[in-house]
Amino acid sequence: MEHKKRYTRLLETARGLGTAGDMDKYLQSILTAAAELTNSESAYILDFDEAAKQLAFSVVPWFHRDALLGVKIPLDGTAEGDVYTKCRSLIIGDASADIRHVRQIDRLAKIKTKSLLAVPMIFRGVASGVFEVRNKVDNGHYTEDDVAVLEMLAGLASMAMRNEILERRLQGSTNEISELDRLKNEFIAITSHELRTPLGLILGHATFLREMLGTEYNEQLDAIIRNATRLKEIIESLSNVDNYQSGTARLRQRRVSVGRVVDDVIASFHEMAKQKGVKLKKALDKTDLLVDADGAKIAIALSNLVKNAITFTDKGGQVLVKAELASGYVKVSVIDNGVGIPARDMPRVFERFFQVESHLTRRHGGMGLGLSVAKVMIEMHGGRIWAESVEGKGSNFTFVLPLNTSPVEKTTEQPFIT
Ligand code: ADP
């Protein structure tokens, strides 16, 4: 083959590496290119079989598939073994006179090997197999040019095979992760469901006892009721996320004034902020900020943000809740000048169970559920939530909800926090 044609053919084959969808087809096309470019009768790829410690034919031309695919060749005393162990190319000009030529191959494939060129397949400096061509046409001799061409094709083939292995491993890991995720979700769903009934009974009976018994036991019963209520909240948070993920969450949409939600939430955190010595302020747009939403759910989202802001702000600090109109959206921000969040943790703060500090060392309670619940509540409404934060300076959690533009209906009068 003339020089320019060879070059073009090589380029074509190299380009195929990036575009090939079917790896088997691509490897077959490399075999064909190898035979053509070296003027050989046929080409083969042998892989090293770790378990058998032998080489095995893994890619062969279709007409030798039945005879050769999977056939093993020992490393000792064979041409292919030599190439693999020494990691060096080898030309055999007269196979009939060379004891390293494995005659069994000729018998199985019904061929007569006269000449052979074999090169190692190397990936990151380690041999992974052997690429060989047999029988230069017209009884010619393999040249240094043939060696160079075959070495290049061997490089392409080993890269293609590596890609395939990596892709399969990646797919395997992805499947494993999604299966683990499914099991985790199923476990959470079953556990929270099973805990709900006994917990309801504990709460019911404790409340009953508190009414029946004298004030003498109030302290103990209050502790039971307080902690059981906390457990109930945790279970609610877990189910909220699950219901959303499984698509079973329901929205009770009404015309809602976001300003009122903010007022209610601020009022309910007044005491917590006061005790902590944190100033809790609000800044509301004068316009009516009306959205079609489930007010209770928006209140849960905002409460979780405000609670975090107070929790993670030191005494003397400030938390500001802002609600404003922003081109088709109502935008609510909870801005604090507290401890902030390290940049490396920012991408994960909305994940379920994620906490910046380890659960064992942190001073605050919580299970890393508040933000994931807030995210679910906002996204259920077609909104979006995000965070900006600078460690040591403070955080800004913002969500937007689509503004209602249809004619005004009755605004719900019930409080959003019960
Ligand atoms: P938790 O209820 O355990 O606090 P969240 O999902 O509400 O869980 O929050 C996850 C983590 O994000 C918190 O543990 C905290 O480390 C960090 N975080 C959330 N809000 C703030 C904030 N305003 N300032 C600093 N860190 C915050």
Image (spheres, grey):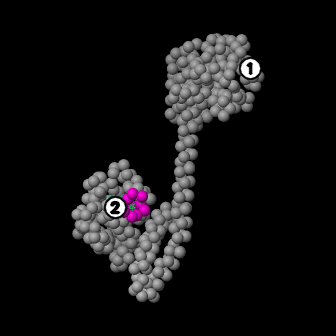
Q: Image quadrant of residue 308?
A: bottom left
Residue segment shown in magenta:
360-372
Amino acid type of disc 1?
A: Arg
Q: Which residue is mark 1?
A: 103
x, y percent for residue 360: 42, 58
Q: Position of residue 315 (x, y in %)?
A: 25, 64
Say what secondary structure mark 1 lies in: helix
Q: Where is the C terminus found, in terms of image quarters?
A: bottom left
Front residue of 19/5: it is 19
Q: Residues within 10 Å of mark 2 (few under 14, many from 20)?
A: many
Between marks 1 and 2, how big is the CA–CA gap? 75 Å
Picture quarter with the N terminus: top right
Q: Answer with the quadrant where ligand 1 appears in the image.
A: bottom left
Indicate the position of residue 20 as horizontal and vertical percent values: 54, 35
Going from N to C along the chain, the mark reached first, 1 or 2, is 1
Residue type for callout 2: Phe
Look at the image and tell me whether residue 403 can be seen: no
Secondary element at tag 2: strand
- Residue sitting at x 55%, y 15%: 145
To which residue does mark 2 refer? 399
In this rendering, position of residue 72 left or right of residue 126: right
